[in-house]
Structure formats: C-alpha cells, structure tokens
Amino acid sequence: MSEGQRAYEAKRAAKAGVSLDKWLAMKAQDRDKLAAAAAKAAEPPKKAGFFARLLERAQRPIK
C-alpha cells in the first residue's frame, strides 16, 4: 500500500473511530464476505427432482 493510500485509509479509520489496523481488517473481512456471496451465487442450479422432470416431459408436445 502506498503512502497516499495509507494516509487515506488512516483518515477513514479515524472518522470511523477505529485504529488503522482494525479498519484494514474490517475491510478485508467485508471483501471476503462479498467474494463468498459471489461464489455462492455462481453455483450451478440444482437438477430438477424426479417428479418435476416427469411433469416437464409430460407437458412437451408429442413428436
């Protein structure tokens, strides 16, 4: 982290009333939560159950 970034984050931490180390830890924790939420949202959809597939097949027109 450059000196300018460190000074900016120190100002934000002071404004929030926490130490710089705690502020950076909170930001890292938020980043991890967002990454976990994005990973969970990217999971492939679950395969339809037996009866749902059966009903879907029954509603398709006969060829």
Image (tube, rainbow, N blue to C red):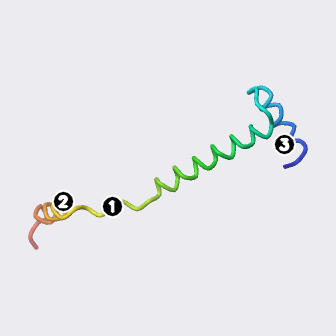
Left or right relative to 56: residue 13: right
Q: Residue 16 lies in what quarter of the image?
A: top right
Neighbor class of circle 1 (other Cα within 10 Å; few <14, some 14-19, many 20+) is few
Along the line of sight, the residue nearer the viewer: 44 or 29: 29
Expressed as whole percent of the image width and height from the top left, the position of residue 20 reads 80, 37
**Alpha carbon distance from label 2 to label 3:** 54 Å
Expressed as whole percent of the image width and height from the top left, the position of residue 36 reads 54, 52
Q: What type is the residue that disc 3 sits on?
A: Gln
Q: Residue furthest right?
A: 3
Residue in the picture at 57% in, 47% down = 34
Residue in the picture at 58% in, 47% down = 33
Q: Which residue is mark 1?
A: 46
Q: What type is the residue that disc 2 sits on?
A: Ala
Q: Are marks 1 and 3 in contact (CB under 8 Å)?
A: no
Label 2 sits on a secondary structure element that is helix
Q: What type is the residue that disc 1 sits on?
A: Lys
Disc number for residue 52: 2
Label 3 sits on a secondary structure element that is helix
Q: Residue 15 lies in what quarter of the image?
A: top right
Left or right relative to 55: residue 24: right
Residue in the picture at 76% in, 26% down = 17
Along the line of sight, the residue nearer the viewer: 55 or 27: 27
Neighbor class of circle 2 (other Cα within 10 Å; few <14, some 14-19, many 20+) is few
> Of the residues under marks 2 and 3, which one precedes in the sequence?
3
Label 1 sits on a secondary structure element that is loop
Query: Does residue 60 sit above or below 26 in this rendering?
Result: below
Expressed as whole percent of the image width and height from the top left, the position of residue 55 reads 13, 60
Neighbor class of circle 3 (other Cα within 10 Å; few <14, some 14-19, many 20+) is few
Q: Which residue is mark 3?
A: 5
Query: Does residue 35 sit above or below 14 in this rendering?
Result: below
Q: Residue furthest bottom?
A: 63
**Alpha carbon distance from label 2 to label 1:** 12 Å
